[in-house]
């Protein structure tokens, strides 16, 4: 199949270098690769590395091996008569191919063959991209103040794999203290030593997209901006700060719905074409690739436009899959209850007498975040970038306990004899990552870093 | 607020029902009163629409979410804990398979009718029954074409009446806010947008359309409804659920028409797409309660008591925790989004029984055919032999 992908720059060079390979691949795989290359400028470095590794690996595969690898997909394509599709634009080809597969009830068979294709090549790609000495990573999930934590159910899904460690919360009187003590270099506003993100910033090995903060509200964003207005902030997404942007997207989508939509596919294409960006100052590290990422998260994740914690989970899952940060901090919060029908009469500009305040759902939020935090862990462990090299930490503000999972050590490990401080947690993260922490901060928790 | 008490709310609902019934009922029903030979038996199929996971419902750890089914209804009936849905794991195709006995491969968003005959058409055609004998009452607004197939020999003349209660509300309110005599709010356009955004809930994404089933709301009735509904909505204690409304409509149809065959699609569970596990579980519990209340309503109506078979079945499962995004979706095609269960109750159903025999959701349609005494053309399902026909 000859496609016209209109590639430029690095993507064009890469496609050119592997042109012979691309032509030997089944058309759906060929189109899939070209569509990814078309998005080159919107790909994170980890994704670009993967694309290069994939093309190189397939190019190095002998012709008969490649035929065996892709033979199943080719057979389904033949059964679906995809060769009759003359479309040369790879995106439109994909749409038409999917429609043809659906029409002939071959989507399931095609998906099965595609899964098989990648199952056969992924081990080699993983070995190439993530050798044993690849960097260690940290995923920290934090239940914000206000969530009605039920201590007997807290982190229950990790009973068999996580280690509970008592925390000493000296001087931590509220959420702000807690966050500063954990990530801001000290519980008191004036203290600046030992900030985790400060240490990451000072490490030349860290790029802004190597450290992510994703949160339902804005406390961590506020903290980061107070800590420093310096260059190289982490990448940060706040559901709360994105409110005006979310409203803009919703209005654009609503307007499109009102004017008529031919199909969900057409609507998705319209959504992808929207050229709206968050206001300056909303995102930490507002590069083009991050802006595109945010739009995709809000438009492709069901519920991400409406539910704060869903946004946190889905954005975290996508960041882990795509950007593969070395540090990801996800902070959940209390979500609002669904508005009853009655409140639908009280829209954005209600009369004063009509205002019904939003009602929070702290109990439901706890049930939600238990599931969502588990899913973030599941997503991370699906990736070779995180398996066997990640320290997972789960904390809940105002709960004098944390849960830790070392993915390189199966099962529960022996907890330290004494309670640890939040500064010790920070020091543990720094040591795990191999980052130099500021002097005078906590002590790494031995069982977690040994 | 004008309607503050539940008694007042009930009054509103009665008024609403009366208004809507005037619209639903074909006028010839009142005009002709011709003799109808109805089947002796009646069947109500209730779906846990949106799909539920076995582990969240019928598995031991899920009983807490279906207390009425687990402790009250299952002991009265027959449970098939091992049921499976084999087709495309979307809503229209899975419910389409339930009502046809065959897998469907049509537009997932409801723009196409099923491609094989539905139980509604077969029932009505063979027995010469009028439309009010077969109903689909669906919270899922994409089910407008669920009542009949696209086959030339069947289709509209034999289809079920399809009512999408929530959609009716949206239309009514849209109409109300387009007039100056509307609900007493200052920014009517903003109200309309808010209403659409909140109620226009294709949970799987934007852009769903409603494919009308051919009936239109009269002008006078529309105005009456608008007034009733807006008062109804002004009550801050009113239920927030589309399924409550579907339940309400179902009871009204049973009271007024006593149809032989109803398929009731509860669908609040699909809120799972919003990623809030607590809301998904809450919707399961609500559906469980509504099924129980529906069964109590059956017992309260002489035309239904002792002659009704109730079949309760999830239209499909949802993804496992390790596939896709877990409960939030149902497109992975893994076992979790295919594994379901079925509970049968009432006439012809052995009490307190259960069988591990694997069944498929395709079996529902031929079972309904056996109970109501019409011929089922060749399909993928087989009647559930444990039931007495």
Image: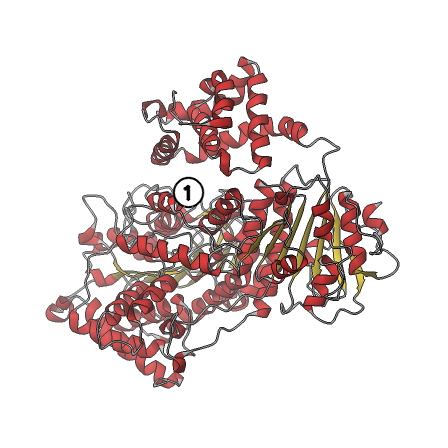
What residue does disc 1 label? B87
Q: Which residue extends farthest left? A: B31
In this view, the residue in front, B358 or A28, is: A28
Q: Tell me if I can see residue B143 in this picture.
A: no
Work out which residue is located at the far front of the displayed protein and give it. A230
The residue at the point 36 percent across, 63 percent down is B199
- Residue A259 rendering spot, x and y as whole percentages: 26, 53
- Graded by Cα atoms within 10 Å as few (under 14), some (14 to 19) or many (20 or more), the crowding at tag 1 reads many
- Residue at the image point whose x is 36% and y is 73% from the top: A345
Q: In the image shown, does B357 or B150 lie closer to the viewer?
A: B150
Q: Residue B143's spot in the image, x, y percent?
A: 32, 55
| Towards the viewer: A41 or A409 | A41
The quarter of the picture where residue A386 lies is top right
Q: Quadrant of the C terminus of chain A?
A: top right
Q: Is A262 on the left-hand or right-hand side of A274?
A: left
Q: Position of residue A409 (x, y in %)?
A: 78, 43
Q: Quadrant of residue A228?
A: bottom right
Say if A396 sits above or below A74 in the image: below
* Above-or-below relation of A245 to A378: below
Left or right for A319, reference A110: right
Residue A43, percent from left and from top: 53, 37
Q: How is the image coloured?
A: secondary structure
Against A301, is A89 above or below?
above
Residue A204 at least partly seen: yes
Q: How many marks?
A: 1
Quadrant in the rendering for residue B87: top left
Identify which residue is drawn at 35% across, 41% down. B105
* Residue at far right of view: A417
């Amino acid at each position: 199949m000859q496609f016209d992908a209109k590639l430029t720059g690095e993507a064009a060079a890469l496609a050119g270098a592997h042109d012979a390979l691309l032509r030997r691949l089944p058309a759906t795989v060929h189109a899939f690769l070209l569509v990814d290359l078309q998005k080159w400028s919107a790909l994170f470095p980890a994704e670009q590395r993967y694309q290069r590794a994939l093309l190189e690996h397939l190019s190095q595969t002998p012709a008969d091996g490649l035929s065996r690898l892709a033979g199943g997909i080719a057979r389904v394509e033949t059964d679906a008569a995809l060769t009759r599709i003359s479309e040369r634009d790879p995106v439109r080809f994909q749409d038409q191919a999917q429609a043809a597969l659906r029409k002939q009830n071959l989507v399931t068979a095609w998906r099965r063959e595609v899964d098989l294709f990648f199952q056969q090549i992924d081990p080699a790609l993983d070995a190439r991209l993530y050798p044993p000495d690849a960097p260690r990573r940290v995923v920290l999930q934090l239940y914000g103040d206000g969530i009605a934590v039920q201590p007997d159910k807290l982190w229950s899904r990790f009973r068999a794999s996580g280690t509970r460690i008592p925390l000493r919360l000296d001087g931590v009187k509220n959420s702000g203290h807690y966050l500063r003590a954990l990530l801001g270099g000290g519980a008191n506003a004036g203290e600046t030593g030992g900030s985790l993100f400060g240490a990451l910033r000072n490490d030349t090995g860290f790029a802004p997209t190597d450290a992510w903060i994703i949160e339902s509200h804005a406390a961590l964003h506020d903290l980061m901006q107070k800590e420093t207005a310096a260059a190289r902030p982490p990448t940060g997404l706040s559901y709360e700060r994105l409110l005006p942007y979310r409203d803009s997207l919703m209005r654009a989508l609503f307007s499109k719905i009102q004017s008529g939509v031919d199909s969900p596919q057409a609507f998705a294409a319209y959504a992808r074409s929207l050229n709206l960006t968050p206001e300056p100052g909303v995102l930490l590290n507002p590069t083009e690739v991050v802006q595109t990422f945010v739009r995709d998260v809000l438009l492709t994740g069901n519920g991400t436009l409406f539910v704060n914690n869903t946004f946190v989970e889905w954005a975290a899952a996508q960041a882990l899959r795509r950007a593969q940060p070395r540090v990801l901090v996800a902070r959940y919060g209390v979500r609002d209850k669904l508005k009853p029908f009655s409140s639908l009469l009280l829209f954005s500009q209600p009369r004063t007498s009509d205002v019904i305040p939003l009602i929070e759902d702290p109990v439901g939020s706890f049930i939600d975040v238990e599931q969502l935090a588990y899913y973030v862990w599941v997503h991370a462990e699906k990736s070779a970038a995180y398996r066997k090299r990640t320290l997972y930490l789960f904390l809940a503000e105002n709960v004098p306990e944390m849960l830790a999972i070392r993915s390189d050590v199966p099962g529960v490990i022996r907890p330290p004899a004494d309670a640890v401080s939040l500064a010790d947690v920070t020091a543990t993260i720094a040591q795990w990552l191999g980052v130099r922490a500021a002097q005078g901060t906590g002590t790494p928790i031995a069982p977690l870093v040994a | 607020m004008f309607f503050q008490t539940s008694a007042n709310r009930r009054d509103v609902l009665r008024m609403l029902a009366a208004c809507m019934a005037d619209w639903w009922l074909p006028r010839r029903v009142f005009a002709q009163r011709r003799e109808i030979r109805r089947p002796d038996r009646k069947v109500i199929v209730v779906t846990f629409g949106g799909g539920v996971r076995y582990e969240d419902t019928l598995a031991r750890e899920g009983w807490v979410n279906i207390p009425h089914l687990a402790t009250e209804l299952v002991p009265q009936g027959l449970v098939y804990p091992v049921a499976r849905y084999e087709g495309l794991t979307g809503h229209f195709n899975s419910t389409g398979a339930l009502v046809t006995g065959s897998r469907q491969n049509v537009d997932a968003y409801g723009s196409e009718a099923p491609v094989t005959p539905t139980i509604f058409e077969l029932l009505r055609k063979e027995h010469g029954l009028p439309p009010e004998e077969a109903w689909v009452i669906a919270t899922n607004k994409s089910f407008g074409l669920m009542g009949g197939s696209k086959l030339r020999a069947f289709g509209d003349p034999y289809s079920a009446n399809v009512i999408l209660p929530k959609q009716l509300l949206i239309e009514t309110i849209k109409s109300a806010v387009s007039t100056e005599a509307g609900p007493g709010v200052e920014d009517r356009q903003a109200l309309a947008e808010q209403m659409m955004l909140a109620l226009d809930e294709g949970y799987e994404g934007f852009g769903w359309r409603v494919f009308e089933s051919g009936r239109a709301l009269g002008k006078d009735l529309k105005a009456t409804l608008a007034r009733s509904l807006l008062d109804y909505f002004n009550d801050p204690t009113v239920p927030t659920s589309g399924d409550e409304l579907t339940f309400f409509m179902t009871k009204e149809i049973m009271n007024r028409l006593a149809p032989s065959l109803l398929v009731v699609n509860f669908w609040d569970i699909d809120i799972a797409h919003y990623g809030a596990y607590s809301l998904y579980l809450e919707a399961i519990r609500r559906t469980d309660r509504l099924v129980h209340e529906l069964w109590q309503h059956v017992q309260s109506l002489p035309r239904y008591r002792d002659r009704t078979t109730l079949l309760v079945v999830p239209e499909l499962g949802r993804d496992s925790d390790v596939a896709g995004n877990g409960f939030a979706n149902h497109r992975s095609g893994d076992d979790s989004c295919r594994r379901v269960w079925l509970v049968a109750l009432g006439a012809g159903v052995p009490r307190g029984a259960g069988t591990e025999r694997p069944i498929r959701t395709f079996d529902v349609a031929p079972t309904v055919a056996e109970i109501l005494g019409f011929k089922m053309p060749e399909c993928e399902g087989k009647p559930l032999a444990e039931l007495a026909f």
